[in-house]
Amino acid sequence: MSDSIDFLEAIGRDASLRRLAPELLAQRLKEVGASDVLANATVQRDSRLLAEEFGIRVMHAPNGTITPFRETPVPLKVPSPEEDKEEGDDDDEQQSLPASPSAH
């Protein structure tokens, strides 16, 4: 498996390998000792075949998925200056708490 990863890394670094026809790339890979699975995945251009080589492990959900809103967003209510002043007037009044019977 580590050899396959090294081969894939080499292909990623070398543009001349990436531009080869799939059959030629598979032939080159076989010449340097790549696995049959990697060569077949190259010819078929199907990365799913590599699951046989590397195993299947889902690490996280793919990025870039756009999920629509499930509910319509409620607009933020910004109070007008009059509403803000009315709310502020209530704060100036003293509020008394009922005396508890055991306060003394």
Image (cartoon, rainbow, N blue to C red):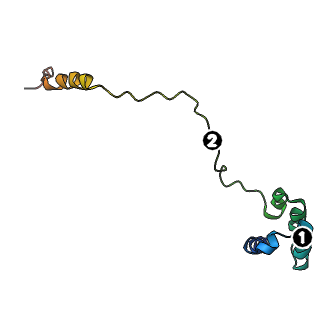
The residue at 77%/56% (across/down) is 56
In the rendered view, tell whether residue 67 sits above or below residue 91.
below
Mark 1 → mark 2, Cα distance in angstroms: 36 Å
Crowding around mark 2 (Cα neighbors within 10 Å: few <14, some 14 to 19, many 20+) is few
The residue at 67%/50% (across/down) is 62
Crowding around mark 1 (Cα neighbors within 10 Å: few <14, some 14 to 19, many 20+) is many
Give residue 85's quadrant in the image: top left
Q: Amino acid at mark 1?
A: Ala
Q: Amino acid at mark 2?
A: Ile
Q: Position of residue 44 (x, y in %)?
A: 90, 59
Q: Are marks 1 and 2 in contact (CB under 8 Å)?
A: no
Give residue 75's quadrant in the image: top left
Q: Is residue 9 left or right of residue 45?
A: left
In the rendered view, tell whether residue 81 sits above or below residue 13.
above
Q: How many marks overall? A: 2
Frontmost residue, 94 versus 90: 90
Residue ranking furthest to the bottom: 32
Q: Position of residue 34 (x, y in %)?
A: 86, 74
Secondary-structure class at tag 1: helix
Q: Which mark is residue 66?
A: 2
The residue at 34%/28% (across/down) is 78
Q: Is residue 70 left or right of residue 87?
A: right
Q: Which mark is residue 11?
A: none
Frontmost residue, 90 versus 23: 23
Q: Which mark is residue 26?
A: 1
